[in-house]
Every structure is written in structure tokens, then in C-alpha cells.
Amino acid sequence: MAEIRSRTVAEPPVDESSAAEDAAKEKERAKRAHKAIIVIFASLLVDLIGFTCILPLMPSILEYYGRKASGDGLYGAVLSRVRHFKHLIGAPDTERYDIVLLGGLIGSLFSLLQFVASPAIGALSDVYGRRPILLGSIVGVGASYVIWAASNDFGLFVVARVVGGLSKGNVSLCTAIVADVTSAKTRSRGMAVIGVAFSFGFLIGPMLGALFSRYSPKSIDVTSESYPFSNPALFALCLTALGFVLLWLLFDETLPSEKRAKSLGSSFADVTTNLINPVNLFRFDAVSSLSASQHKRVRLLGVAYFLFLLLFSGLEYSLTFLTHHRFHYTGMEQGKMFLYIGIIMIAVQGGYLRRRPPGSEMKTACQGIVVLIPGIVMVAFAHGAPLLYAGLALYSFGAGTVVPSITSVVSQFGNDDEKGTLMGILRSLGALSRALGPVAACTVYWSIDSVTCYVGGAVLLLIPLAMLSRSS
């Protein structure tokens, strides 16, 4: 009895006031995180709707510049290079494929500019805070739409895409913001919300762009001084302005001054080397707070992320070739197909992914690739709608799970003052893969055949799968 009494006396008293204070702080933090994620979701959604509304208009825009090509040396020079590449890989000599490949080239240019800009934008946000850099990024995107609205010649249109590519850092900044306000237990749900915004944006934006295309004049007078595609550009500008106002009024800084980096680096040469050099980016050299083991794992995740998106983006881009070449799909039928993909991705990210338990991100990413591989093979051998759409269902599940899961895991590394740099580098590697993937897939698709392109891509996906399994 004496021993029991002594143990009872030795037990420290429970500080109920301290526990209540901690609970109140945690509740307040969760409230701020919830508000930040809602604001980020809304601003990202309206931005992506404006960004994607140009996609169905791109063929018409490029055809317009083609008809105005007399005296436009830039358009003629670029089209000549596209046709040379088309003949080199053996693609059919039709005007439709000229336009598709030219649009792909412009998309690759945009991705290459993102590759350059994303790490720098992320690093700037670590020093100056997320809010001012995010607002500045949106202003740059808005400026690109102003230029697009006045792009009566091809050169000015390219300038608009360049300005947009260099300015569009809001996606990597949004992932850094989610990392700022969430804990390890809730981070994957926050990243899933960004994925849902992407899916909704890429679902709604092209539909609105198609409406602009449908109600635009059927016969465009290329001699007119007025630009026939100014309305969708102004629509995108209005959405960007709405996103800016939402952030200006409702978004509070998530990286307080005491947690920020003191400077970008020891010298300008070090900064440019670590944030632009592809080798250093793959090594994540700009993130100095990682231990040796953490650096090794982040590098492995970065390479796996790059390889996955390299293969996936190539197959995604060549899907329009496959459905047109094999199934004779029109633009409207392809739009319905991408609508089907988008709806499944929204269901996966908004339902399944947000309900996955904390710590299961790597398992979820691996499951996504395992499901994606047979989906791609089914598409490769599909000669009818049932097999094609069954394969696309599996494809959509993989597309909706892999990238958010890897992003969530990578965001857990590094100190608070390097989250922007970390997520910017990851975004940069994704942009580089999206610049190179379509070129590689088109080359295989037309030089050999579609089955080899898709089955080969499915087999090569085993490499990032093995790397992700190894890193878990």
C-alpha cells in the first residue's frame, strides 16, 4: 500500500489549463488552414479556367495566323521547322497535323519557361513571403492576357505566351502554402484539394473556350485590324482579376517574417546555378536544410516524378492523334472524351484521395501507376469505344492519384523557409517533363506505330514505380 501511495504522490498533476490552451491553439490553426485552402482553391480554380479556355481555340488561332502569314516571317519559319519534324518522323502530310504539332511546340515553349521560372518564384516566396509573390505572379499572367487580346500578329501572340510562362508560378506557390498551413496528417488532403481545382479547371475552361469558338464568326477577315480572339482573352483577364481580388481581400500570409529565409543565397552565381542548372535541380542543391538521407530520398522522388510525367504527358498528348487516326473522332468527340476523363479525376481526387489515411501517400502513388499501366495497354489495343473508355477509366484513376501523392510526400521535407524553393524545383522538373514528353511520344508514335508508343510507355512506367516503391 505504501508503494502504491508513493507512486500516486509521484505522479505529476495534470495541467488542465495548459491542455485547454493547446487545444484552442490547434483549433485556431485548423481554422486558419481551412480558410487558406478554400481561398487558394477558389483563386486557383478561376485562374485555371482562364488558362485552359485557350486550349480548344488554339487550332483556330493558329489557322488565323497561318492565313495572315504573308509578311509574317516568324510564323513561316516556325511552321517550316514543324513540317520538317513531321516529315522526319513520318507523320501524315496534312494541315491538321501541322496545326497540332505547332500547338504542341507552343505548349512545350510554355513548359520550358515554367522550368526556368518556377524555382526562382518559389525561392523569392521563401524570402519575401507567399502573398506578395503570388499576387505579383497573377499580375504577370494578367499582363499576358492583355497582350494576347491585342495579338493581331503571331509574334505578339508568342510574346504573350512567353510572359505567361515566366509569370505563372501560382501552382508551385499554392503547394507551398498548403505545406505551410497543414500538418503531416492533413497535408495529403490539402494537396488533393489542389488536384480537384486542377481537374475542375481543365474541365470547365475548355468547355467555355469551345463556346467562344462556337459563337465566333465562321469566316474571319484576316485583313481586318480587329483581333477576332480578343473576347476569350478578355474573359481570361477578367477571371485573373477576380482571382487577384480574392487573394488581396481574403488571403493572409502563411509564412511569417520570422520563418522566412534571410536571402536567396550567398551569391548571384550560386543562386542562378542552383535554380536554373538542370543537374542541380535534379539534385535539389538549393534546399540546404535536408540531411544526407533526406536529400537522397528527395532526389529519388524527384527523378521518379520527372520520369512519370515524361511518359504520362507524352501519352496524354498523343491521345488526340490516336482517337483521330484510329476512331476518326472530331474535336467535339474528343472534347466529350476529355470530359469523361475529367469527371473521373474529380471523383477520385475529391473522394478517394481525400479519404486516404495519413502516411499512405507512397502506397497510393504506387497503386495509381499499377492501375494506370493496364489502362494504357487497353487504350493501345482498343478498336472500339467500350475497351477505349474502360482503359481511360483506369488511366483517369492513375492521373488523379500519382502526382498529388508524390507532391504531398515531397512537401514534408525541408524547413519552412525552403518550402517555396522545394516545391518550385519539383514543379520545374514537372514542367521540363511536359516539354520533352510530347516530342518523344510523337516521334515514337509516327516513326514506329501507336501500339509500340503506348505499350512501350506502359512498360517504362515500371521504372518510376520501382523508384517510388524503393523510396517508401
Image: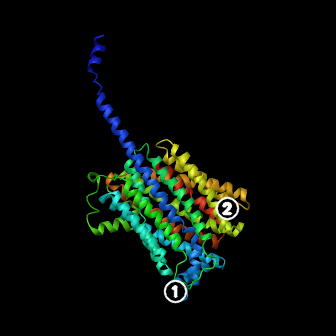
Which label belongs to residue 72? 1
- Dot 1 falls on a residue whose secondary structure is loop
- When asked about the image quadrant of residue 162, the answer is bottom left
Q: Which residue is mark 2?
A: 380
Number of other residues with Cα within 10 Å of mark 2, as a class: few under 14, some 14 to 19, many 20 or more: many
User: Seen from this angle, which residue lies furthest top?
Assistant: 1
Q: Picture coordinates of residue 1 (x, y %)?
A: 31, 10
Q: How far is the residue under mark 1 from the one under mark 2?
A: 40 Å
Q: Are marks 1 and 2 in contact (CB under 8 Å)?
A: no
Q: Picture coordinates of residue 156 (x, y %)?
A: 47, 79
Residue drawn at x 71%, y 67% is: 326
Q: Amino acid at mark 2?
A: Ala
Of residues 123 and 283, the one drawn nearer to the viewer in this rendering: 123
- Dot 2 falls on a residue whose secondary structure is helix
Q: How is the image coloured?
A: rainbow
Of residues 458 and 413, the one drawn nearer to the viewer in this rendering: 413
Which label belongs to residue 410? none
